[in-house]
Amino acid sequence: MNKIFTVNGWKDYIYWQTEDRRTLKKINSLIEDICRNGNSGIGKPEPLTGDLSGYWSRRINDKDRLVY
């Protein structure tokens, strides 16, 4: 499966690589789980509504989400 980041998403990913390896590890685990399980699995997957209808999010931590 190909993984494509938005420009801002890639900047955030680079930020986590330099600032918080623990959070980066969690993000990588979420990405792997998304590839394996789609819209179920770890990180409390939730469908988004409104302008982001059709997308899903998973919790990285209490304040940050991974949207896919």
Image (cartoon, grey):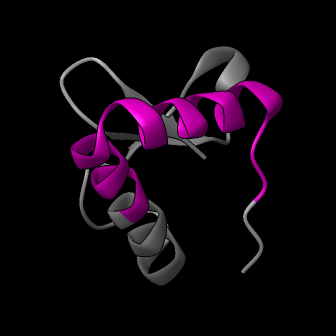
Q: Position of residue 29 (x, y in %)?
A: 34, 65
Magenta span of residues: 4-28
Q: Position of residue 4 (x, y in %)?
A: 78, 55
Count how many numbered circles sit on residues in the image: 0
49 horizontally vs 54: left or right:
left
Q: Residue at x 57, y 29 (%)?
A: 12
13 horizontally vs 30: left or right:
right
30 horizontally vs 23: left or right:
right
Asked if one can make out residue 53 in the rendered structure from this viewpoint, the answer is: no
Front in this rendered view, residue 4 or 14:
14
In the figure, 25 relative to 66: above or below?
below
In the figure, 50 relative to 15: above or below?
above
Question: Can you tell which quarter of the image residue 8 is in?
Answer: top right
Q: Position of residue 55 (x, y in %)?
A: 63, 41
| Residue 5 drawn in magenta | yes
Front in this rendered view, residue 19 or 67:
19
In the figure, 65 relative to 4: above or below?
above
| Residue 25 drawn in magenta | yes
Outermost residue toward the front in this view? 18
Magenta segment, prevailing SS (helix, strand or loop): helix
Q: Residue at x 39, y 51 (%)?
A: 27
62 horizontally vs 37: left or right:
left
Quarter in which the N terminus is drawn = bottom right
In the figure, 61 relative to 28: above or below?
above
Q: Position of residue 51 (x, y in %)?
A: 72, 17
Asked if one can make out residue 62 in the rendered structure from this viewpoint, the answer is: yes
Q: Residue at x 46, y 83 (%)?
A: 36
Q: Residue at x 22, y 47 (%)?
A: 22
